[in-house]
């Protein structure tokens, strides 16, 4: 019940135990094509360029940034938590000129603040995290696409923490690049990063395309594809090459991580079978029950609740309580993991997730019951049954 | 029965269906520590810095090169196949000054040729593929460590294609950095890259260390770790950070790909239970049987047999035969995949693997029987039973 990775859906684990097939076996390439279509559904996009990057979510982030940003390009990163800092860090390593605006952890920016910064910085790319698990809040993105378009700025976001549990619309919100991961609301393991790119983003990436020497030798036409703009600084994360591998050319790049592909495919199948909006509503229900339960125990919630993600909550550690000792007792005696926190919140809040396969009534109620018992042993005065009672009220009201 | 990825060992697939645990759950960190020790056994090293990079084998290559090479560093790459070109390509993108020597596909270099090039180029790093599946041969490395040490050159190799099926000794051969992958002789899926680094390589990497801003804020001591040398150009592949994540600090970096870790761990457990040298001997036996069988069918083998890897063989497509049609018939009618080839060998040879879980008598014999049947239908004149008969002779001699 931490902020991710969480228990994977058993269906995903079963899918990942399927035997491998060859990299160009027709059934394998059919799985790749099917997975692209499934993630168009999850991302809410018609983008042809929708695929998986073989690595954890930060691999997807780096692939997007290193492919979109040439050294010296200006990028604007609004930072409202740890993962904003990560975007800054990765963009800097891409050689970009990085500009930031910052807001207190637990709050978000207004569209006006972001537009003002765009006018000042004149970036080629706006890079902003959607939901930042470090603070539990999500930056509203729905008005930013139009602002970016008006000022000719590419618009990129990472939705690892939010996708599947919170409303997100790639096309309707005007996103040019979106990256995610399986280990939160998608209910899978870390290790595959779904990504989608608008035609505008693809055009930027294609302009930086090159083809590996070991593959180039027999097709003279490939000479046309030699380096034109500044070459992408990474081979592994070169989305132009990865697009040729996933596209009709099927030009060899890495050896696709077959088992992770099976997992990513099953994550999307589960969500689209339940219905994307139904999955989001399930996260909203169980997240509300957890929030009500923690409040019902007399604990104080961190952050701007108006922008809180459905799938994670940060709660202040009561005065005089050793946060790590409580976490250890929950894990060792109850088999329940809750999360610590980073940076300015370290030692101040716990983070509790209700996401993916763990967004269920039984997990919410057992976590609240266990937390009550552990906190009472730690000397905290609590309303007996206040947590589970308040959560049950949420479920009754929803029924 | 292609050159990889191959069928995974069912034990690996079962291990990968285990439920996830939290990133800092004591059982997870124990698995990480255990996996490091297992790969010390596979790599034949005492290197403390032995761990997994979360991505396919080329992710491991890029992590090694981008972490070891600063822009402008000179690197020497002896190229004897497609994957030599890949090392060149990745090193160029790291901003290194890349020098190559080349030899015809199917042959290898003498130590004298490599030493002469080192003396001419004076590189900081020698980067050479061990076994190159594109040509089926392995470059002898056992004399190169001493040469590198004598000239103060770091020595890096990629063993994705060879490890577990061919003798390889990290420490005895004087390697400073070694990268691999699971999808060949280790019998697992692509998606995790085991890597080992000598103390000398770690010192170079540590000199380029930085710590993420989102993690840095609360520990004033971290300021000491600010950028000293040229910062590593990638966050995801920053081995200094990845070492802090796998080391006693457990400093958060990416979210470890738990399921891939389970798989990588099981691959190593299987090999070390069988015995590393016994596993190599098994590959040698079945590789010899396949080679004898193909010869017994009257086909011609490609490449320098003195340096051929045990686990893959390239065989000329007979004149007048459509290589892709034969591969399609083998796959569609017999369920057996064999490989095509790249670059100068494209359309000229098939590549057939006997590796990992597929290095077995039954797979060798059924492949030879099926190939005979398909080639006869394609109009090739063959000795009836010549393939399976020759393979059986190898097995009888070995018994």
Image (cartoon, coloured by chain):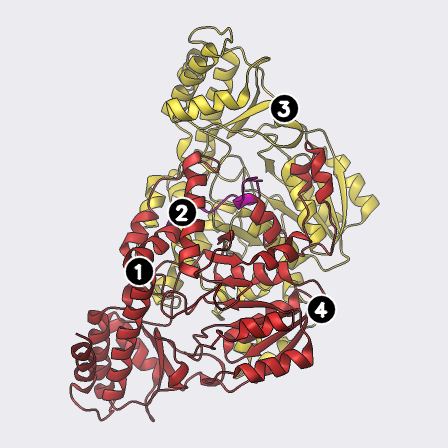
Chain colours: A red, B yellow
The residue located at (50%, 16%) in the rendering is: B294
User: Which residue was labeled with disc 3?
Assistant: B303
Q: Circle 2: is it few (<14), some (14-19), or many (20+) Cα within 10 Å?
A: many
* A330 with respect to B336 (left or right): left
Q: CA distance from mark 4 to mark 1?
A: 51 Å
Callout 1 touching callout 2 (CB < 8 Å): no
Q: CA distance from mark 2 to mark 4?
A: 38 Å
Please indicate, yes or no, whether residue A143 appears anywhere in the rendered image.
yes
Q: Determine the chain carrying the residue at label 1.
A: A
Question: Mark 4 or mark 3, which has the lower sequence index?
Answer: 4
Where is residue B211 shown, x and y percent of the image? 58, 73
Q: Determine the chain carrying the residue at label 3.
A: B
The local secondary structure at tag 4 comes to loop
Q: Quadrant of the N terminus of chain A?
A: bottom left
Question: Mark 1 or mark 2, which has the lower sequence index?
Answer: 2
Name the residue nearer the viewer: B198 or A241.
Answer: A241
Same chain for the residues at labels 4 and 1, yes or no?
no
User: Which residue was labeled with disc 1?
Assistant: A275
The local secondary structure at tag 1 comes to loop
């Amino acid at each position: 019940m931490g902020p991710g990775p969480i228990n994977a859906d058993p269906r995903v684990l079963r899918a990942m135990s399927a035997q491998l097939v060859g990299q160009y076996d027709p059934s394998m390439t059919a799985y790749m094509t099917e997975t692209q279509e499934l993630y168009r559904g999850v991302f809410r996009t018609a983008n042809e360029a929708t695929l998986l990057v073989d690595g954890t979510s930060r691999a997807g982030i780096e692939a997007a940034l290193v492919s979109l940003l040439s050294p010296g390009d200006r990028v604007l990163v609004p930072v409202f938590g740890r993962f904003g800092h990560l975007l800054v860090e990765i963009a800097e390593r891409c050689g970009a000129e990085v500009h930031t605006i910052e807001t207190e952890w637990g709050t978000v920016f207004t569209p006006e603040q972001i537009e003002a910064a765009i006018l000042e910085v004149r970036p080629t790319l706006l890079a902003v995290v959607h939901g930042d698990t470090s603070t539990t809040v999500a930056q509203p993105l729905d008005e930013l696409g139009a602002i970016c378009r008006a000022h000719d700025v590419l618009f990129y976001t990472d939705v690892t923490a939010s996708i599947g549990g919170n409303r997100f619309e790639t096309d309707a919100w005007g996103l040019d690049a979106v990256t995610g991961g399986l280990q939160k609301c998608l209910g899978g393991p870390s290790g595959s990063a779904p990504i989608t790119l608008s035609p505008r983003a693809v055009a930027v990436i294609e302009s930086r395309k090159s083809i590996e020497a070991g593959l180039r030798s027999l097709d003279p036409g490939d000479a046309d594809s030699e380096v034109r703009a500044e070459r992408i600084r990474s081979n592994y994360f070169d989305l132009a090459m990865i697009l040729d591998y996933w596209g009709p050319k099927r030009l060899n790049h890495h050896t696709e991580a077959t088992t992770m592909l099976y997992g990513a495919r099953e994550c999307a199948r589960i969500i689209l079978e339940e219905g994307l909006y139904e999955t989001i509503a399930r996260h909203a229900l169980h997240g509300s029950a957890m929030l009500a339960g923690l409040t019902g125990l007399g604990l104080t919630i961190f952050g701007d609740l108006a922008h809180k993600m459905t799938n994670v909550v940060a709660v202040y550690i009561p005065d005089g309580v050793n946060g790590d000792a409580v976490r250890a007792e929950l894990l060792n005696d109850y088999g329940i993991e809750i999360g610590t926190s980073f940076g300015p919140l370290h030692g101040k809040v716990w983070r509790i997730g209700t996401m993916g396969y763990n967004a269920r009534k039984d997990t919410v109620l057992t976590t609240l019951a266990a937390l009550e018992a552990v906190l009472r042993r730690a000397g905290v005065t609590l309303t007996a049954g206040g947590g589970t009672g308040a959560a049950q009220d949420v479920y009754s009201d929803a029924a």
